[in-house]
Amino acid sequence: MKHLEKAAEQLAGHLAGGGLRLTRPRRAVLEAVMALDRHFEPAEIEKRAAAAGVHRASVYRILPVLEAAGIVRRVRDHPGRWHYEHVVGHQHHDHLVCERCGGVTEFASPAIESEQARQCRLHGFTETSHHFVIRGVCRQCRAGAAGRKEKTRGRR
Amino acid sequence: MKHLEKAAEQLAGHLAGGGLRLTRPRRAVLEAVMALDRHFEPAEIEKRAAAAGVHRASVYRILPVLEAAGIVRRVRDHPGRWHYEHVVGHQHHDHLVCERCGGVTEFASPAIESEQARQCRLHGFTETSHHFVIRGVCRQCRAGAAGRKEKTRGRR
DNA sequence: ATCCTTATTGCGACAAGGTCGCAGCAAGGA
DNA sequence: TCCTTGCTGCGACCTTGTCGCAATAAGGAT
Ligand SMILES: [Zn+2]
Ligand SMILES: [Zn+2]
Ligand SMILES: [Zn+2]
Ligand SMILES: [Zn+2]
């Protein structure tokens, strides 16, 4: 992934200007993070990092570093609960998730985005991101009564 | 709140038609739930219920009962993360979640709902439900520089 | 009012996510 | 190579949530 390099540079740059050090664990976590698609929870990174000999506690100390470096962003779902998302090179889209085959279809709707903005304005809310998932049955599954049982949904 | 009575009835009715029993713990949890605003996490109920002598494990077993009774609904914030919301006197709406204070604001937008339908039609997708959460900073938090009283949860 | 059946609870052990203090390790400038 | 000191591994500990099991108590029957 080209993104990895870009992120690596970004991290190095960030660390440089602060007397911080580019260590093996940090590099490992960076790679684990970039190997994932978009949204992820610390636990996922924890697992991958562990395989690289990085201790759990370190992962939780490194993730905030990546955030400070502008590589990922920490988002709160609810009080006391967080997850991360990539910041590097992703453009916005929302998802249609099939309940039968698990397939994920992405879609982008300017109409929805602008209506969203209007709603935020209406409530004096400053949006930083949103999560929109529509669940249901996809075309293929409805056509073939049986429903395909698999349809690659991004590697985990 | 008049809602409590209504909910109590609903619960009683639900239990009746199933050989289920209206117990003290269930009544306690029901009251704890109805005493709260609209959205809440199990932990909050757990605390209030504990004060009433209800064991933690019981709370987690009772909440699903209230859901089955149509009193609350389990809402997904993000993969693996849930919270509950009252169903009694509420109609469909989506959520604005503040990243600073964790506050949840509800909103309903016919425009978004219909655009959603259009997108589904466009992709031959049959919707069964959707989850739409906009994250950001609420009015109060942006106004008060420090943000509203952060509902700290065991974090130092 | 008392009995009985059995739905439900309390309990404690567990698993997973996450934080903290501390001593030893190592990045990287001198 | 040496040194400073930023980082890491470790392990103890806290919180949220689940489970099996024996004791308890609804609530219909008598
Ligand atoms: Zn499908
Ligand atoms: Zn996507
Ligand atoms: Zn709601
Ligand atoms: Zn707020």
Image (cartoon, coloured by chain):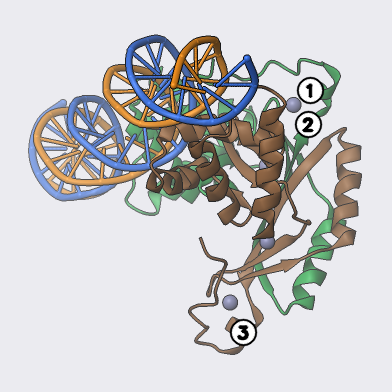
Chain colours: A brown, B green, C blue, D orange
Q: With A96 as the anchor, is A92 left or right in this view?
A: right
As drawn, the label of residue B90 is none
Q: Amino acid at mark 3?
A: Gln
Q: Is mark 2 within 8 Å of ligand 4?
A: yes
Question: Which structural element holds mark 1?
Answer: helix
Q: Nearer the viewer, residue B42 or B138?
A: B138
Question: Which structural element holds mark 3?
Answer: helix
Depicted C29 relative to depicted A10: above or below = above
- Mark 3 — residue? A140
Q: Is residue B120 visible?
A: yes
Q: Chain of mark 3?
A: A
- Mark 2 — residue? B137
Q: Amino acid at mark 1?
A: Cys
How many discs appear?
Answer: 3
Q: Is residue B40 visible?
A: no
Q: Chain of mark 2?
A: B
Q: Nearer the viewer, residue A108 or B30?
A: A108
Residue B36 image position (x, y, % from top left): 59, 27
Q: Chain of mark 1?
A: B
Please rate how many residues cluster around mark 2, counting C-alpha atoms within 10 Å: few if below 14, some from 14 to 19, many from 20.
many
| Residue displayed at 39% across by 33% down | B59
Residue C20 image position (x, y, % from top left): 45, 15
Please rate how many residues cluster around mark 3, counting C-alpha atoms within 10 Å: few if below 14, some from 14 to 19, many from 20.
some
Q: Amino acid at mark 2?
A: Val
Mark 3 → mark 1, Cα distance in angstroms: 46 Å
- In which quadrant will I find the N terminus of chain A? bottom right
| Residue displayed at 75% across by 72% down | B120
Circles 2 and 1: CB atoms closer than 8 Å: yes
Q: With B55 as the anchor, is C13 left or right in this view?
A: left
As drawn, the label of residue B141 is 1
Mark 2 → mark 3, Cα distance in angstroms: 40 Å
